Image: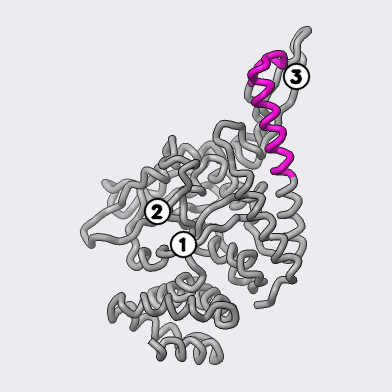
Amino acid sequence: MKRLPLITHSLFAELVDQCRSEPRSPELWPLSGSIVTVPVGDQEHWYFQKSRRTTSGKYQQREYIGPVEDQGLAAKVAAFEAAKAGYNGRMEIISTLKSSGVAAPTGKLANLLLRLHEAGVLERALVVGTIAFQAYGAMLGAKFGQSAFHTLDLDMTQAETISLAVGKNVNVPLLEVLTGLDETFREVPGMDPRTPPVSYINQDKIRLDVRMPFTDPDRGPIHSLKLGSHGQPQRLLDYLVADPVETILLVGGGAPTQVPSPARFALHKIIVSQRRNSIETAKKRKDLLQAQQLIELLMEDDPDALRSAYKDLKGRGQKWNAYFKDGIEALAMAVKQSLTEICEEN
């Protein structure tokens, strides 16, 4: 783990401020696209040209808006162009951040995140897993080892608190949002075909898993109106997602969402690593690597966050604490000693 230069970390803070001051407007067209004028006879007409990054098919799609002489449409187009200018500026900031070594989603996974942002899903979601870990780099001013970033999966649950401006629920099923990006997305059937799906995958093996806090051992998938999908109940997820933090994912012109607190993420990863079976050795190593790098950083910058996260974990029961203590033994000696000292204080 290395520190990002202060100027790079400050640039991310500027991106956050800009995203907050210029939130996504559901009334406008997605800012990844553009508006073009097309002559038809002796009149010009506006068309919205969709981004290839967020739509399915081989060809760039256009959507008719109306004649240029329509004054009502002219005001809306002007508002779009003003918002687009800010969007382009934020894209330049993100490009600079990435060229400075800040990790960011890439390829088709980045396109998926951008699509979810434009559909309003990310603003209602709390992203967990490796994409959340990746987001911590820019947030905390750190450059983590690249081996901890590789993933084709996106894991998320619903955010408990969202902006009133966003609206409470998505308007379409999650699968419809996904197939609008890539027609090969499909539901992944569960072990019991009678239960609703909680996962989605496309032909490139990019997978989205929806999780929900575990409440009842006999409870099946839980429906989330906020996300337009069912989610699989997961033990200790309630611990992970308590006290979430807001961040900006580095896709498009910036995609606001929520992620777990870094301290809870690190301790939760230690537990998860010990619940992996023998065929998940690579995932276990990645769990521990992510936890270790976050703990190293937090021990320097915010040890109280680790103390608070452990205090909550300690009250979660003997089984989880046993997993946690076993996981500590697999950490590097210096990290193990530092974390053990914090545990012994509580």
Q: Is residue 144 above or below residue 169?
A: below
Question: What number is the disc on residue 160?
Answer: 2
Neighbours of disc 1 within 10 Å: few (<14), some (14-19), many (20+): some
* Amino acid residing under circle 1: Pro
Vertically, is 296 above or below 195? below
* 288 shown above or below 32: below
First along the sequence among labels 1 and 3: 3
**Looking at the picture, which amino acid does disc 3 mark?**
Val
Q: Quarter holding the C terminus?
A: bottom left
What mark, if any, has residue 38 been given in the picture? Answer: 3
The residue segment tinted magenta is: 65-88
Mark 2: which amino acid? Glu
Instruction: List x then y, in percent, for residue 156.
Output: 45, 55
Mark 1 or mark 3, which is nearer to you? 1
Q: Which residue is labeled 1 in the image?
A: 244
**Dominant secondary structure (helix, strand or loop) of the stretch shown in magenta:** helix
How far is disc 1 from disc 3 in space, using C-alphas? 46 Å
The answer to whether the residues at label 3 and label 2 have Cβ atoms under 8 Å apart is no
Q: Nearer the N terminus, badge 1 or badge 2? A: 2
